[in-house]
Image: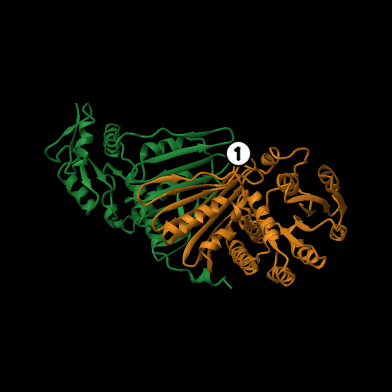
């Protein structure tokens, strides 16, 4: 019997991503309720799934058909909605990244899940991507000590990818380019992008370089982006991202160089279901190997992980989730300060 | 009429043989292009060659050189054959419709003894893609690895990671990626330099350059001599070297550490 899912939020991530993903996992989940803050988008999305719709979280949490809450609302609301879901006696929570925008909120939300024994899965799809498991295995088995990490993103507007996974969804109006010469704006852009975009990959970075030592540089990049360099566990890490108004397809690449190899994990664009990332290894013996890609992508894998937790009752690594938040928020705060200084 | 080439460097004899209409073997430096091995004090060898009547100098795989010594070579027609930087691919890159990138990302790794040369070549590519001189803003290098942020004029930023990796090819492995609506990617190692441009409609990979780098270096110097031009190789190398040395001698920054909690 599939678990009833109540979805909080009705934005592009829900329409283009989670509803189609859940629809493809009919044995495990079915959407029974969609709610948002009253934009009017929840009703048509719910209707397509044969689900109820509402405005505001309370009705969804009162709905006995909702066993699993999927939190896809603005990040500042995540922690309170996790806590409310647990208080309402829901069986599990899926929360889009980040769990919270402050450490105190994250601690409170995760502690609520821990106390109640409620499984919590955070939508860090890159961490769940089967390719990362492959890469991690290679690094553990044959990679040698990590020398450096690079995460490089060049992203065209999301609408290009929404258009191939959904329809009849009005694109967001283009925002004016921020004035990055203003130190406060530069700091704000860097903070927001690190917690909203770099957060996809920071759990992977933390997996390899867990002890965040110091931010070496941080700069907001036009039109919208960042260049951040930091040292963690003695390993230099560079994060570079530019969001572009048009142009080439998305580049989303995490590179780990070890004392033996260079390993590229290249992720598909957000929203699309194009299978796993690709993993390429340039090895010390001269071999240049690209591993077979998995049919499953990280979005499917993260929902599968939640289904497995519900089925098995295995404990969630709550401390790992909390450490991910600590890492990301501290990096974002330190980088924002530097970005403001150097604007 | 061929240009005579005096080469104690064995690899260049094959290159001379591959330019039968342009070059021939010389038995002395006088009036010839002289090939100097870059492994030693090549700047002194280059001066000696010109004192002996050389019309120009090719330096094969130049190693580190003191800046003040390089100043004494100014005005001498010199072509540098750099391990991870090819002038013909650089021409492809300059001709590519890449525009002004928002950012340039550099990843540079090499065995420890080759790291400085690899970084020098990586910075040459970054300078070329940024289409502006580079200036170091921040760097931290310790334990044979580090990160740096550079400014390229008023527009692009260049960020890089650099590190010693015993598993990298002997001369190193580097990748330079420009982030813009049209994206350029350059990868270089001992065997090959690969260049590709991606835009909204296509991805174009430049053809493999099969000409051996020694032949390319000779051809470039012959062309420069015929045109009575002094190649910019030495000036470029001097700038790239200074920048690489500055990065490689940047200790952990106390100011950056002050922002950590």
Closest to the observer, A56 or B121: A56
Residue B158 appears in view: no
Task: Specify whether B59 is left or right of A234.
Answer: left
**From where the camera sits, is residue A328 visible?**
yes
Residue, disc 1 = A247
Disc count in the image? 1
Q: Residues within 10 Å of mark 1 (few under 14, many from 20)?
A: some
Q: Is residue A34 left or right of residue B60?
A: right
Name the side, left or right, on which A39 lies relative to A22: right
Looking at the colours in the rendered structure, which chain would you say is drawn in orange? A
Please state the chain letter of the residue tagged with numbered disc 1 in the rendered image: A
Whether A131 is drawn above or below B112: the answer is above
Which quadrant of the rendered structure holds the C terminus of chain A? bottom right
Residue A188: x and y in percent read 67, 60
> Is residue A17 found left or right of B119 in the rendered image?
right
Q: Residue furthest left?
A: B27
Looking at the rendered structure, the secondary structure element under dot 1 is loop
Image hue for chain B: green
- Residue A120 lies, in percent from the top left, at 70, 62
Q: Position of residue B183 (x, y in %)?
A: 53, 41
- Does A309 sit above or below residue B103? below
Q: Looking at the image, is A215 positioned above or below residue A284?
A: below
Picture coordinates of residue A18 (x, y %)?
Answer: 72, 49
Q: Which residue is painted at 14% across and 39% down in the image? A: B30
* Of residues A241 and A100, the one drawn nearer to the viewer in this rendering: A100
Q: How is the image coloured?
A: by chain
| Residue B193 falls in image quadrant | top left
Q: Nearer the viewer, residue A161 or A94?
A: A94
């Amino acid at each position: 019997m599939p678990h009833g899912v109540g979805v909080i939020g009705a934005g592009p991530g829900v329409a283009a991503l989670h509803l189609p993903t859940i629809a493809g996992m009919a044995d495990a989940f079915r959407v029974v309720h969609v709610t948002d803050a009253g934009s009017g988008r929840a009703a048509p999305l719910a209707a397509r799934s044969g689900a109820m719709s509402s405005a505001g979280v309370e009705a969804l949490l009162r709905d006995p058909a909702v066993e699993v809450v999927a939190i896809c609302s603005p990040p500042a609301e995540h922690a309170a909605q996790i806590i409310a879901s647990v208080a309402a006696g829901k069986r599990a929570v899926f929360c889009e990244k980040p769990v919270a925008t402050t450490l105190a909120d994250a601690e409170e939300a995760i502690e609520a899940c821990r106390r109640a024994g409620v499984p919590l899965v955070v939508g860090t799809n890159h961490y769940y991507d089967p390719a990362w498991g492959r890469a991690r295995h290679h690094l553990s088995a044959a990679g040698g000590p990590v020398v450096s990490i690079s995460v490089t993103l060049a992203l065209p507007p999301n609408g290009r990818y929404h258009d191939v996974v959904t329809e009849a969804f009005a694109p967001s109006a283009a925002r004016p380019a921020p004035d990055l010469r203003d130190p406060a704006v530069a700091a704000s852009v860097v903070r927001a992008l690190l917690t909203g975009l770099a957060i996809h990959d920071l759990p992977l970075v933390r997996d390899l370089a867990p002890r965040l030592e110091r931010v070496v540089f941080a700069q907001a990049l036009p039109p919208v982006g960042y260049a951040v360099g930091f040292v963690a566990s003695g390993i230099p890490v560079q994060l570079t991202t530019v969001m572009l108004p048009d142009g080439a397809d998305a580049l989303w690449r995490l590179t780990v160089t070890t004392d033996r190899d260079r390993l590229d994990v290249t992720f598909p664009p957000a929203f699309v279901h194009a299978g796993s990332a690709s993993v390429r290894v340039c090895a010390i013996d001269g071999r240049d190997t690209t591993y077979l890609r998995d049919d499953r992508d990280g979005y499917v894998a993260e929902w599968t992980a939640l289904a497995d937790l519900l089925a098995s009752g295995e404990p969630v690594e709550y401390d790992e989730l909390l450490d991910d938040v600590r890492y990301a928020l501290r990096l974002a705060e330190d980088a924002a300060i530097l970005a403001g200084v150097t604007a | 009429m061929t240009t005579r080439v005096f080469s104690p460097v064995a690899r260049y004899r094959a290159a001379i043989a591959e330019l039968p209409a342009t070059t021939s073997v010389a038995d002395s430096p006088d009036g010839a292009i002289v090939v100097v091995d870059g492994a030693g004090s090549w700047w002194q060898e280059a001066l000696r060659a010109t004192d002996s009547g050389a019309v120009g100098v090719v330096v094969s795989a130049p190693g580190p050189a003191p800046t003040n010594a390089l100043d004494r070579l100014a005005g001498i027609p010199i072509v540098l054959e750099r391990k991870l930087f090819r002038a013909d691919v650089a021409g492809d890159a300059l001709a590519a419709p890449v525009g002004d990138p928002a950012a340039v990302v550099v990843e540079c790794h090499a065995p420890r003894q080759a790291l400085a040369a690899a970084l020098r070549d990586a910075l040459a590519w970054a300078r070329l893609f940024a289409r502006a001189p580079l200036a170091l803003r921040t760097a931290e290098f310790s334990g044979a690895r580090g990160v740096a942020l550079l400014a390229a004029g008023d527009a692009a930023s260049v960020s890089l990671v650099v590190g010693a990796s015993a598993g990298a090819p002997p001369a190193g492995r580097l990748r330079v990626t420009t982030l813009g609506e049209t994206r350029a990617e350059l990868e270089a190692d001992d065997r090959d330099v690969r260049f590709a441009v991606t835009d909204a409609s296509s991805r174009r990979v430049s053809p493999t350059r099969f000409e051996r780098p020694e032949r390319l270096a000779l051809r470039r110097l012959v062309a420069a001599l015929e045109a009575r031009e002094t190649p910019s190789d030495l000036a470029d190398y001097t700038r790239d070297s200074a920048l690489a040395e500055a990065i490689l001698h940047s200790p952990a920054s106390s100011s950056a550490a002050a922002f950590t909690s």
